[in-house]
Image (tube, grey):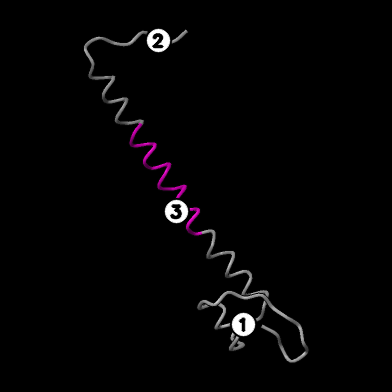
Amino acid sequence: MANKDGIQYRIQPDELGSQFACRKMDYKEYLYLQKKGSRRPIGLTLAMTSGFGRKGEDSLRLFYNNMKVKPKPLK
């Protein structure tokens, strides 16, 4: 996309790109919101992974604490 002065901008064909094309925001706001939106899935993935890891650890602790024969501790 290019403006009247001939400056070319690289935008994605999505909701944010159409808002930038309609001049509802400037390019700096567009880039900020695009980066902010791409961080959300990464944060959700990390949160879910840590949550499942914690639940797995709790399950293993429960399993080993209920065993009649305790495993020998590692040296």
Circle 3 is placed at which residue position?
44
Front in this rendered view, residue 7 or 48: 7
Task: Give the label on residue 73, or none.
Answer: 2
In the displayed structure image, the side of residue 33 where residue 47 appears, left or right? left
Q: Amino acid at mark 3?
A: Leu
Q: Main secondary structure of the magenta part?
A: helix
Task: Give the label on residue 35, or none.
Answer: none
Q: Secondary structure at mark 1?
A: loop
Q: Secondary structure at mark 3?
A: helix
Give coordinates of residue 63: x percent, y percent. 26, 23
| Residue 47, magenta (yes or no) | yes
The residue sitting at the bottom extreme is 4
Q: Amino acid at mark 2?
A: Pro
Circle 1 is placed at which residue position?
25
Characterize the local packing of mark 3: few (<14), some (14-19) or many (20 or more) Cα atoms within 10 angstroms: few
- Magenta segment, which residues? 40-56
Give coordinates of residue 40: x percent, y percent. 49, 59
Front in this rendered view, residue 8 or 63: 8
Q: Amino acid at mark 1?
A: Met
Q: Quadrant of residue 36?
A: bottom right
Q: CA distance from mark 2 to mark 3?
A: 36 Å
Q: CA distance from mark 2 to mark 1?
A: 61 Å
Q: Secondary structure at mark 2?
A: loop
N-term mark: 1 or 3? 1
Q: CA distance from mark 1 to mark 3?
A: 27 Å
- Count of residue discs: 3
Q: Residue at x 50, y 53 (%)?
A: 42
